[in-house]
Image (cartoon, grey):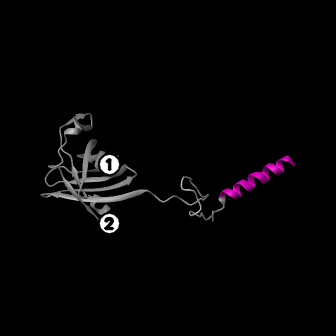
Amino acid sequence: MKNYFVAAALLMTALACEKKSTEKINTATTPPDSVVVPETNEPLESSTRQSCYIGAVGKDSVFMSIDDNLGTITGKLRYKNFEKDSSFGDVAGSQNGDTLKLFYTFQSEGMTSNREIYFLRKDGNLLEGIGEQKTEGNDAVYINPSKLKFENGHTMRPTECEGFEKKFVN
């Protein structure tokens, strides 16, 4: 008999978890300093925003697609250079104010390397920071990020993301 009650309790708990909430919350009568969380199994809406950028200097071009999830940045970056080695890879990092601090893990000349890279958001564009770097193994990092110059690097402007993945194909 005891096992019957335990089984019935587990079954009711499982059924309660599967039930979708149709609960309506009257915000007019809810005190402003209280938080009401309805019971639901609905997935939360993603907070990730995707942005795509393109830039060109002479016959060189750069393409970037980034996903911004509340300041955590991930994406793809490609430098397509004329008459010199190009590179393609992933970026990951964070945004602090108007500055993106990313680590670029890329393929070039058959090798995998990592490079620290900074972008400044200005007037809707991304300006790449240029500065002195040091190399430790396959990693290149800036010696003094506070001295980066954003006027001489690539300037990338926003572009549509639809079909943008074709820009990353060799």
Q: Which residue position is annotated with label 2?
A: 163
Q: Amino acid at mark 1?
A: Val
**Marks 1 and 2, Cα distance to the nearest angstrom?**
19 Å
Label 1 sits on a secondary structure element that is strand
Q: In the rendered image, which quarter is residue 38 located in? A: bottom right
Q: Residue at x 26, y 34 (%)?
A: 137
User: Quick check: marks 1 and 2 in contact, CB under 8 Å?
Assistant: no
The residue stretch that appears in magenta:
1-17
Q: Earlier in the sequence, mark 1 or mark 2?
A: 1
In the rendered image, residue 54, in percent from the top left (x then y), is placed at 23, 59
Q: Is residue 14 magenta?
A: yes
Q: Of residues 80 and 4, which is closer to you in this image?
A: 4
Q: Of residues 164 and 19, which is closer to you in this image?
A: 19
Q: Of residues 168 and 9, which is closer to you in this image?
A: 9
Q: Residue at x 17, y 38 (%)?
A: 132
Q: Is residue 53 magenta?
A: no
Are there few (<14), some (14-19), or many (20+) residues within 10 Å of tag 1?
many
Q: Residue at x 25, y 46 (%)?
A: 118
Q: Amino acid at mark 2?
A: Gly
Q: Which residue position is annotated with label 1?
A: 91
Label 2 sits on a secondary structure element that is loop
